[in-house]
Structure formats: C-alpha cells, structure tokens
Image (cartoon, helix red, strand yellow):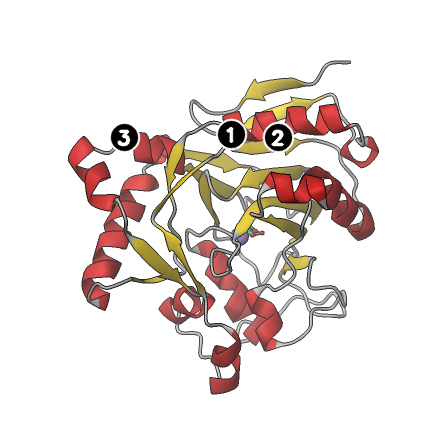
Amino acid sequence: MAIRFRKLHPYVGAEVSPIDLRQCHDRAELEQLRAGMDEYGVLVFRNQPFTDAEQLAFAQRFDGVLHAKPGAAALGANRFGNEAIADISNVDNDGRILAADDRKRAYSLGNRLWHTDASFQDPAGRYSTLSARVIPKVNANTEFADMRAAYDALSDARKQSLEGLRVHHTITRSREILGFEFSAEEKQKLKGAIHPITRVNPRTGRKCLYLASHAARIIDWPVADGLLFVMELMEHATQPRFVYSHEWRDGDFVIWDNLATMHRATAFDDARHHRELRRVTTIDVPLQAVAAA
Ligand code: OGA
Ligand code: MN
C-alpha cells in the first residue's frame, strides 16, 4: 500500500501510514520517507514497538552514519553500553526515578531549552529518531519549530545580515545556562563545533536558520552581542505559529530533521512520573558518501 502523509501543522509535521518501519528495507520506500522529511521536517509514526537493536538498524539503513559522541558521554558511559542510543529518560540504571539533584537529571533538563541535536559536532546531527518506551499519563510533549518557515519570514535586510555568520555551538553552553557545572576534564572533551547560522537543504534548496541553545558565540563578534543576536533570532523562530507540539502516545516513533527544525522537551512532574524514550541520531555526512560506503 502506498505511504500517505497527513499534515499535522501548517508548516511542520506529518503523520505517516501505513508502515511498519522495522520491516521497511526497500530503498525506494526509504527515499519516499526522506522526501517526506524534506517536505514536513518532522514525521510521526504510530504503533512502532522498536527494540534498541531495531532502532539502531533502522536509523542506519535510513540515513547511513550514526552519531555516537553525545555530550552526555563526557560525564560517563550510558546504561546501554552504546553511545549511539541516547537515554532520554528520568530513571537510573535500575529504572528508579532520578532524584531532583541527580547529575544525570540536571544534564537532561537541558533538553527543555530549544536546541538541535549534535549541533556541537561536525558533521552535526541530521535526523533524530525518538522511540517512546514509557509514556506518562500527564502531558510531556516535545515541541518542534520550523526553521525554514522562520527563515522565510525574515525581512530581506535581515536575511542579508546573516550571510557569512558562523556560530560556535557547545553542549557546555546550554547546560551552563541552567547552572550545570562541568569539571575541567569534562570541558576538555566538549569543545564544540562551528557552523554557519543558515544552512541549505541540498535536495530542496530550502534555506533555514541553524540555531540552538548550544550557541555560545558568533565568530569574530563580542560574546554578548553574538548571544543577544542569536537569542533574538531564536525568539523569532519559536513563535507559536512555527511550532508543532507532539503529544506522545505509547508506541510512537518520531523522526525529525535537525537542519529544518529546533526542538525542546516541555516540563512535567518528573519526580512522580516515569518517562522513557530512546533516541538514535544520524550525522550530516553527504548522501553520496553514504551511498559509496
Ligand atoms: C531528544 C530531545 C525531547 C523530549 O531526544 O533529543 O530533545 O521531549 N527530547 O524528550
Ligand atoms: Mn534533543
């Protein structure tokens, strides 16, 4: 049966059906999904009971190279023994809810700031796949802002002012905003990466803003000027009209394009409710290189 995309929002997000991604191996079908990513930026799939191994395999066959150096690895190995699987949860190794002052919790609260995955690396993150494993009864949505629509809405003068600007992204910046402290040794591992402030999708030619709370400075600018400039653009880009808010259901699997969107987790009572998802992110290596490998 042909894959259908049902729009969830005027700019960003579509629900895809009928498809079982664990069984999806056909290159043409996978490329239809990529075309869907190019159009909608965020794709939602229902009833996809992935295991970790299946999620890793899917991300790899869909897009090639996995991101395996998450910021969290600088703090210690994760409970899965594989850094390509990000532990998006509020539980410890024994499945118990983390204490309010737990370091892992403090670190993961950074996800509540608008960001793009792995913008602190080069190549940066391309697609993130997020698999719902334990979804609380209370609302704990993930929000996605369309950075293409946000770019398009800028004035010509503003667009012009962005040409040639480069931003240093580092995970320490987004965590330090929330008071998280890194040791000198941890900082040593988290130097970050530099990316242009706008990027172009090579398949569609569409331009987008490329921002995140990981943005620490604009290269060659005074720090404060650069941060104020980035913060103002982020405020513009995350206006409600550009944002799709995903309400999680059991079995959901969501894929987003980190070049076309920023995202954030929303607050919930994480001392009471268990919430557990797994993320596998691919990196933005040219597709020709993936095909040749
Ligand atoms: C992520 C992330 C948000 C959430 O998995 O990269 O930012 O709602 N998650 O858990
Ligand atoms: Mn994220």
Task: Determine the residue positioned at 65% across, 58% down.
Answer: 86
Along the line of sight, the residue nearer the viewer: 96 or 234: 234
Q: Residue at x 41, y 30 (%)?
A: 206
- Taking the spot 66% from the left edge, 60% from the top edge, the residue there is 87
Numbered mark located on residue 203 in the image: 1
Residue 16, image x, y percentages = 65, 24
Instruction: Read off the residue under disc 2.
Output: 34
Q: Do the residues labelled 2 and 1 touch (CB within 8 Å)?
A: yes
Mark 1 touching mark 3, by CB under 8 A? no
Q: Residue furthest bottom?
A: 184
Residue 153, placed above or below residue 293? above
In this rendering, is residue 4 above or below 173? above
x%, y% of residue 228?
22, 57
Q: Earlier in the sequence, mark 2 or mark 1?
A: 2
Look at label 2 and name its amino acid. Arg
Question: Residue 58 — which label?
Answer: none
Ligand 2 under 8 Å from disc 1 Cβ? no
Residue situated in front as seen by the camera: 211 or 16 = 211
